[in-house]
Image: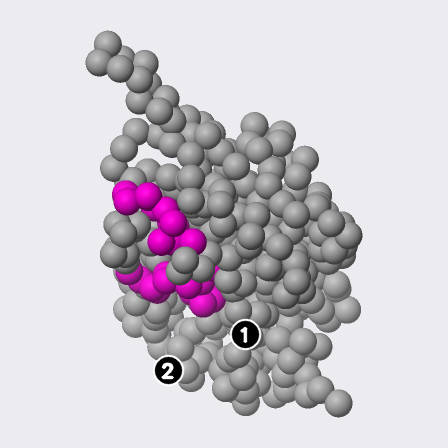
Amino acid sequence: MRIAIPSETDPNETRVAATPETVKKLIGLGVEIFVQTGAGKTSGIPDSEFEAAGAKLASGAFETLADADLVLSVRRPSPSVLGGIKKGGAIISIMDPYGADAALKEMADARLNAFAMEFMPRITRAQVMDVLSSQANIAGYRAVVDAAAEYGRALPMMMTAAGTVPAAKIFIMGVGVAGLQAIATARRMGGIVTATDVRPATKEQVESLGAKFLAVEDEEFAQAQTAGGYAKEMSKEYQAKQAALTASHIAKQDIVITTALIPGRAAPKLISADMVKSMRPGSVIVDLAVERGGNCDLAKPGEIFVTDNGVKIVGHLNMPGRLAATSSSLYARNLYAFVETLINKETKAFAPNWDDELVKATLLTKDGAIVHPNFQPKA
């Protein structure tokens, strides 16, 4: 069996789908690993380290993909790369399939078995495969680091001979994995932290990290979480009440970090232009949802935008990729844990159990068809 690790084709992608650590483990399963030359460069992994781990280097994408039974990548490969994968081959990546109907059809037409790692079910045996959590952890941490850099002032309270420096007030909007890591990081850096989320279960988590919870706690709030632990889209009425509560709070904050995402939908708008106008000059907003339309009305993808009243709105793309070495290491381990379940230990061949709940949850295309239930035609 042959596994291919091509270079990423997205210009904003700095991560890689394997590390020397996971290459050794994969080879231990009895497979061959081919890594495209330079695939790990932006993650700080030179070709020599992959080679020392037992991988074979290939000079280009098509040479890397030739005869591969399984392709591992961070993002869904471009159409030009898909053409180099043999029919019946499999690809595992973060597929970002919502709104990508043409890309799904291309993978189906190419008769590829395509797996979306972000659809991994949140069950006990799949925790080690949870890419959303591993990458969101890094994003939440990096968001606070970037916010501190742009803020231009100290975050902790400082008692000095020349006087006291007040602690920065930091507000985290959305308390998923990224939000919790942002809270923990902001607290470690000495900020006064508050946080909000529509899911009632997050209140205890926020308070356990030493932050103060802020939310409209009504009947709708009590039912605002799916069985899978994700936030539901709230009614317009609730959004209006929550906006009124947060508007006065945001005006007093030095740093605001937004992390709210709803799978398959545009990011909910949490910060209006008027709220931004109410903030003090030098304040910072970091929008982690900017690639999905943004939680802030004024956020611009890939830019640090400074408003007329001096508020910086940070819209970096691919926040986990800003710590590529760490995020690649975690992502590669997520992939390895899943791949291990797909290989027959006796024949050393790619042999998924198509009835396994992990496979059924992540499989997008098979035998020339789009098979995932989320992408079937609606009656």
Q: Is residue 374 above or below residue 295?
A: below
Q: In which quarter of the image is the N terminus?
A: bottom right
Residue at x 62%, y 30% (from the top left corner): 208
- Residue 331 % position (x, y): 49, 52
Q: Nearer the viewer, residue 288 or 15?
A: 288
Q: Which amino acid does label 2 sit on?
A: Ser
Q: Is residue 306 visible?
A: yes
Magenta span contains residue 154: no
Direction from residue 106 to residue 312 in the image, left or right: left
Direction from residue 59 to residue 126 in the image, left or right: right
Give the magenta-colored segment's residue range.
275-303
| SS at badge 1 | loop
How packed mark 1 is, by other alpha carbons closer than 10 Å (few <14, some 14-19, many 20 or more), is some
Looking at marks 2 and 1 on the same chain, the residue that comes earlier in the sequence is marked by 2
Q: Is the magenta stretch mostly helix, strand or loop?
A: loop
- Residue 164 % position (x, y): 31, 17
Residue furthest out toward the top: 161
Q: Is residue 200 above or below residue 13?
A: above
Q: In this view, does 68 lie above or below 143?
A: below
Judging by the rendered image, the residue that carries numbered circle 2 is: 80
Magenta span contains residue 297: yes
Is mark 2 in CB contact (under 8 Å) with mark 1?
no
| SS at badge 2 | helix
Closer to us: mark 2 or mark 1?
A: 1
Q: Quadrant of the C terminus?
A: bottom right
Q: What residue type is labelled 1?
A: Pro
Residue 120: mark: none
Judging by the rendered image, the residue that carries numbered circle 1 is: 97
Q: Residue 98's image quarter?
A: bottom right
- Residue 332 % position (x, y): 48, 52
